[in-house]
Amino acid sequence: MNIGLWLKRQAQLNAERPALYSGRDLVADYGTFHRRALQVAGWLVAQGVRPGDRVAIFMKNCPDYLIAQYAIWYAGAAAVPINAKLHGREVAYILDNSGTDITFTSPGLTEALSDADVKGRLVDITANDYAAALAHDPIDEPVHREPVDLAWLFYTSGTTGKPKGVTITHRMLMGVSLAYGTDVDNVSAEDAILYAAPMSHGAGLYNMVHVLAGARHVCPDSGGFDEAEIFDLARHFGRVQMFAAPTMVKRMTDVAKATGQSGDGLRTIIYAGGPMYLADIVEAVDHFGPIFVQIYGQGECPMGITALSRHDVTDRSHPRWKQRLSSVGRAQSMVEVRIGDSDGAFLPPGSHGEIMVRGDVVMPGYWQNPDATGKTLVNGWLMTGDMGFMDEDGYVTLQDRSKDLIISGGSNIYPREVEEVLLTHPQVTEVSVVGRPHTEWGEEVVAFVVGKADPAELDELCTQNIARFKRPKAYIAVGELPKNNYGKVLKTELRKMLEKET
């Protein structure tokens, strides 16, 4: 079944129900939302897009993001959402690897691709092509798709330095959406989802369940995260639900306390995407009240591994409430979660090991990458690479992350990506990138460099090749990198060096 049918069904019953907002302004009701998606789908088909083809969305948050997304599904194609903060060369790689011929863009981002070797057609939503798409003859109805067909091709960075495409099926999207109502929060037509985090990632994955319920979809005029704007929109719309990285929650709490905001209108904040410090979530709950739910997921099991309920986040009566609040919750209803040793054998409660997941919301594999698939999906289990333990009640606590992932402001940064760029400088002989704790962003990127390169030159090199949020905030010159007997760089020693500086 094509998940786009959820929009069609909502439009059939509630065509005049308000759907898409830009700030406070209503852009489309559900009938208009559905009709525009059919028209853009008709235009895509006229351009030669066929079922199974990939169509990319490289846009900032705006109502037309959802119109483009459902048009892609209506045409039977798969959406390739791309982080609007990526560098043009990174976008070019994704478009080439996914075999995408058409990319929807928004103002400012089309220009960002001008210097990159981008293949295919760019369709700016403010230009003539998109106007023609909105005026095109609509297709009759969404193209039939099987549950196992590709719906969303999500690119996540890997330790090889090149992003891998996670294949997300229609069944996976339906499973995650339906589990939301069971494990995360209830949704009704009176609710509004506020897209303050990138729609290419977690925030966007929750649009489907809100379409199913006929809720309102609100895109801030800023196109992103602004605390004052969020508080204003929450007061205006009421019953607002939103996804936020822990750093966003921390900033909202700080601004609210400094300006006297109570968070009126905020019904639910789902937080994920990085470590939430215990003191920060306690402070947030004390100020805003019982509005928080935590989830844990990966691109390979999007938003669907565990959930820490509103009650668990708020409860202070349980004898182990602090331990539970420091966890990421219990397995969601669509998956099994276990802790395994290095061979994948199950470990008893309380044992430290790798978090393993299986179920209908786990990816079938990486896009055209059987080697990576074989290493990640083992005997039917997704090997997350995250380390932790599960207590006797099923609460999972993350202790550290394998693969040296850095999470800054809710965005994933893999050191290898940055290291490969820095190593192209002729005066850099070795480099190692690690994360350093940061009070606002969670972590920041720091590069230890062996060689005589000028930090300004290294910064410019990163500017030319990778997204700004991935650039190191400091370049530390060292005579050599600490290594073990096998020549492997000891990043734990580098982190200890950073701790001594603070």
Image: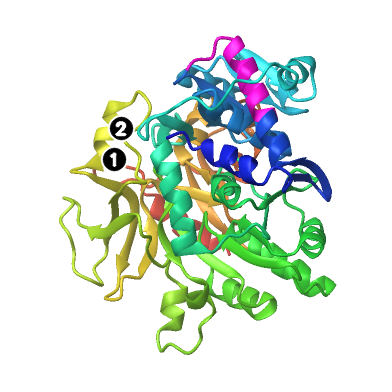
Which percent across, then down, holds residue 495? 46, 56
Which percent across, then down, holds residue 275? 50, 61
Circle 1 — which element? helix
| Position of the N terminus by quadrant | top left
Q: Nearer the viewer, residue 36 or 80?
A: 36
The residues bearing labels 1 and 2 have C-alpha atoms spaced at a distance of 6 Å
Q: Which residue is mark 1?
A: 376
Question: Which quadrant holds residue 487?
Answer: top left
Compared to residue 407, the image places residue 439 above or below, namely: below
Q: Is residue 142 left or right of residue 338?
A: right
Q: Is residue 387 left or right of residue 92?
A: left
Question: Which quadrant holds residue 483?
Answer: top left
How would you classify the magenta stretch by its main secondary structure? helix
Q: Does the residue at mark 1 contact the one at mark 2 (Cβ under 8 Å)? A: yes
Q: Which residue is mark 2?
A: 372
Residue 58 shows in the view: no
Q: Nearer the viewer, residue 4 or 389?
A: 4
Query: Which residue is pictured at 48% across the width and 33% down the height?
Result: 152
Q: How many marks?
A: 2
Circle 2 — which element? helix
Query: Which residue is pictured at 47% across the width and 41% down the height?
Result: 414
Query: Which residue is pictured at 67% across the width and 59% down the height?
Result: 191
Compared to residue 36, the image places residue 433 above or below, namely: below
Which residues, given as a range, are shown in magenta?
36-50
Residue type of the residue flagged with mark 2? Ala
Q: Is residue 144 left or right of residue 35?
A: left
**Crowding at label 2, few (<14), some or many (≥20) Cα neighbours within 10 Å?**
some
Residue type of the residue flagged with mark 1? Thr
| Position of the C terminus by quadrant | bottom right
Which percent across, then down, holds residue 343? 16, 50
Compared to residue 184, the image places residue 19 above or below, namely: above
| Residue 289 falls within the magenta-colored stretch | no
